[in-house]
Amino acid sequence: MQTVVSRATLKRLPLYLHYLKSLDKSNSENISATAIAKTLGFGEVQVRKDLASVSGAGKPRTGYVITDLIRHLESFLGYDNISIAVIVGAGKLGKALLDYEGFSEYGLKISTAFDIDKEKTGITEKGKQILSMEEFSDYCKKENVKLGIITVPAPHAQSVCSIMIENNISAIWNFAPTHLKAPENVIIYNENMALSLAMLSEQLKH
């Protein structure tokens, strides 16, 4: 049974993984929690606690074996098992997410986008397909899709959310600036870019 960690820890784990993967392994095979904390700006105690939840404690003086720590983090986060995701909404944001290649590093493959406007269907510059919403249900069943991304205007987001749930999608990444209603067993993560920018702007004032 996998260890349960807090939401705050879960948000930090990908940061550790990204940093560890960026290291030049030829310089050293090991790294300490102190070095990780200093580079990422976290507390050393917090780093030790986070890593202990997925990889056990580092050894005195030598710390963690980098390759082992990467493997443990990838396994815990599920990055070693590629998950297929689909997008509904093939506007500028939807196409940008569809063609972004960096998700594969985190075990996610956005395979296809869907749009109600048939004029938007076709193949993107990166060779990804955009299909009509008429094909959504059949595609989800065929590929056993469990993760959906919503990039439609706010007034249409709830209907798209409902369609995803009807097709057994159990995790939704929502970019529409609106609250979505869903059963308790459906995970929804709201990505409010306007709010994030406002918070950043507010921090600049201080």
Image (cartoon, grey):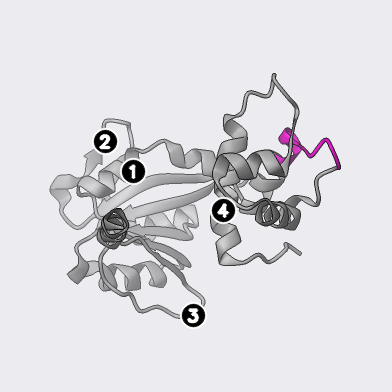
Marks 2,4: beta carbons within 8 A: no
Q: Which residue is mark 3?
A: 184
Residue toward you, 38 or 155: 38
> In which quadrant will I find the N terminus?
bottom right
* Amino acid found under the numbered disc labelled 4: Arg
SS category of the residue bearing label 3: loop
Question: Which residue in the protein does label 4 denote?
Answer: 12
- Where does the magenta region start and end? 60-69
| C-alpha gap between disc 2 and disc 4 | 33 Å
Callout 3 touching callout 1 (CB < 8 Å): no
Is 151 displayed left or right of 1 in the figure? left
Q: Residue at x 72, y 34 (%)?
A: 67
The residues bearing labels 4 and 3 have C-alpha atoms spaced at a distance of: 25 Å
Determine the residue located farthest toward the top in the rendered image.
26
Q: CA distance from mark 2 to mark 3?
A: 35 Å
Percent coordinates x, y for residue 23 in the rendering? 61, 28
